[in-house]
Structures are given as C-alpha cells and as structure tokens.
Amino acid sequence: MTGKKEKSKERREKRLQEIALLGTIPYSDHQRWWSEETIAVVTGANRGIGFEIARQLAGHGLTVILTSRDTSVGIEAAKVLQEGGFNVDVHQLDVLDGESISAFVEWIKEKYGGIDILVNNAGVNYNLGSDNSVEFARQVIDTNYYGTKNMIKAMIPLMRPSAAGARIVNVSSRLGKLNGRRNRIQDAALREELMDLETLSEELIDRTLSTFRQQVDDDTWQSGGWPQTFTDYSLSKLAVNAYTRLVAKELSDRQEGEKIYINCYCPGWVKTAMTGWAGNISTEHGADTGVWLALLPDEAVTGKFFAERREINF
C-alpha cells in the first residue's frame, strides 16, 4: 500500500512539474498576442470559477466583461476586481433570457464594437455526494447546454477579425465524456453517432436531450441507459462537449484573419458552491486551463477537450 502511495505521489509531483513548465506558454512576452484592447466576456462570473477566470484574464492585461444574472451581485463582484486595479466592466446577463442576451449584444456593439474571447462558464448542478436526483433536470440542461449554445450563437457575429483569431472556451466536465469507463451512455450506436463528426449534428444533440427529458417526465429515465452519476449534469456537459466539436467543424473553413477557435475543458472537482465546497481543487487551479486555452497562441488548437492543460479524449 505504501508503495502505491509513493508512486501516486511521484506521478502527482511529475504532473505538477509539467504544469509549471506549461505555465510559461502562452504567457511569455514573445507569444503575447493580446493587450488591454482585447475584450473577454465571462458568463456567470460573479463567483467561483467564473470570477477567478475573470480575475486571471484581467491580471494578464485584458479588458474583461464580467456578467452575472443578478445585476447587484455582478456589480459587487466587479468592484472587488476594479479595486484591485484590474480593467473590468460588468453587465447583467441571463443566458436563458433572449431579451437579456439581445440587450447585452447591443451594449457590446455600442461600447466595444465587438469581442475577442468568450468564456462560457455559467452553469448549475443540484446534486451533491451520492445524490442523483433529476428533479431539476430541465433547468440543468437548459442552463448548461442551451445557455452555452445561446451565447455562442449570439457572440460569434460580434467576434472581431484578428491575426491571432477569436477564442471560445466552454467550461465542461469529464462526466460528459462519451466513452468514460463507468459513467457513459449505454447505447453504443448513439455514442458512435455522437462521436463521429460525419453524423454529429445539432439536431442529434438536441434530440438526445429531448429523449432524456421525456423519460424524466415519464419517470422511466433510470432504465434508459443514461450515465448513472449526476445524470442530468453529465448529459448537459456531454452535449456541451459534442456541440464544441460541431461548432469547431463549422468554423474550420473561415479564412485567415477571421478564424475562431473553440475548445472545452474540465476544471476538476473545484471547491465552490456548486460542489457544496466539497471539492479538492482551488478555484485558482480550476480556472487555470480555461485561461490558458483562451490565450494560447497555437492556432491549430480547436474542437478539443482539455483537463490540466492536457488534451483528453471526448
């Protein structure tokens, strides 16, 4: 047992060394493509991982627009960063409210003209520990997947042309892996359809979620072959991961100077309100890969899934 612990410790230390080495990319001066004129939007940024992503991006010298569903909470969160000397603006945004999104789009156009980076962080999860209730499945799927999709569709027309390319980062989860060993959709044919870019479509993703939600309404979901850990949350993030790949494919034929790169990542089990403060990872560490993806100089990175700055399989 002791030997296993030692090996585990060695692996962890080696990984931390690799992360420290990767920490110089893309933050060295000669790879710095951004400036204070670079505009980054972070959804659900009034607390937790979103707040920390906003703080780190602002710390790298970008102008960050912190958004929050609750106006007063967002203003207070922005004040904390502004008092720290960061260039942070704030605006109300409900990713499920079409009028709220439209108002935000118009405000962006008027004040900034466009954006360069979108971080889709807004999300919810109502299960903790060994719970697996689907009482709030509709809200979880609507916020985590449809809210993310709403923002991508609304923000792409606002993304400014540049040599470096615009960036979209979707905060996701390993629980949404299509081919996870234990927590996955049991229907192999459906998994294959969702994995294959030739058969993957927005309609397929939406139909899969619609089937699950109908089974929730009928109380037959437990025999539907769905992931058994945080089922609603896992499926919402599976949809985010699939949609990330789909959008990357759709954006791939854009000409140089108008490129948009989109990726998703798992922050890990972070100690935030969403995990009931039971996580084992700090918000600083949980935000790190998201910030790294937003600032990467490597134009070839798109349609990928990351954890701890490593690409992992969907």
Image (cartoon, grey):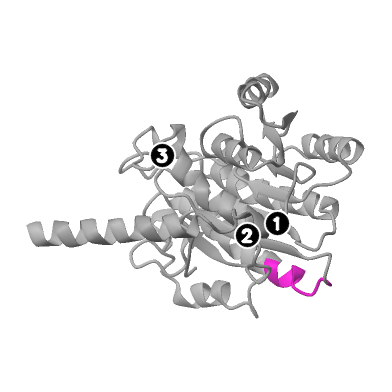
What's the CA distance linking mark 3 and mark 1?
24 Å
Q: Which label sits in the foreground, 3 or 2? A: 2
Q: Is residue 107 above or below residue 130?
A: above
Residue at 52% in and 39% down: 49
Q: Nearer the viewer, residue 80 or 95?
A: 80
What's the CA distance linking mark 3 and mark 2?
22 Å
Secondary structure of residue under mark 1 = strand
The answer to whether the residues at label 2 and label 1 have Cβ atoms under 8 Å apart is yes
Q: Nearer the viewer, residue 86 or 74?
A: 86
Residue at 79% in and 75% down: 253
Residue 251 located within the stretch drawn in magenta: yes
Q: Which residue is mark 3?
A: 282
Q: Is residue 156 above or below residue 205?
A: above
The answer to whether the residues at label 3 and label 2 have Cβ atoms under 8 Å apart is no
Secondary structure of residue under mark 3 = loop
Q: Which residue is mark 1?
A: 167
Residue 107 percent coordinates (x, y): 86, 35
Q: Amino acid at mark 2?
A: Leu
Q: Amino acid at mark 3?
A: Ser
User: Which of the image's four quarters has the N terminus?
Assistant: bottom left
Q: Which residue is mark 2?
A: 296
Residue 231 percent coordinates (x, y): 43, 52
- Which of the two labelled residues, at mark 3 and mark 2, occupies the earlier sequence position? 3
- Structural crowding at the residue carrying mark 3, measured as other residues with C-alpha within 10 Å and reported as few (<14), some (14–19) or many (≥20): some
- Res 104 label: none
Q: Amino acid at mark 1?
A: Arg
Question: Which region is colored magenta?
Answer: 248-255
Q: Is residue 222 visible?
A: yes
Residue 83 percent coordinates (x, y): 64, 21
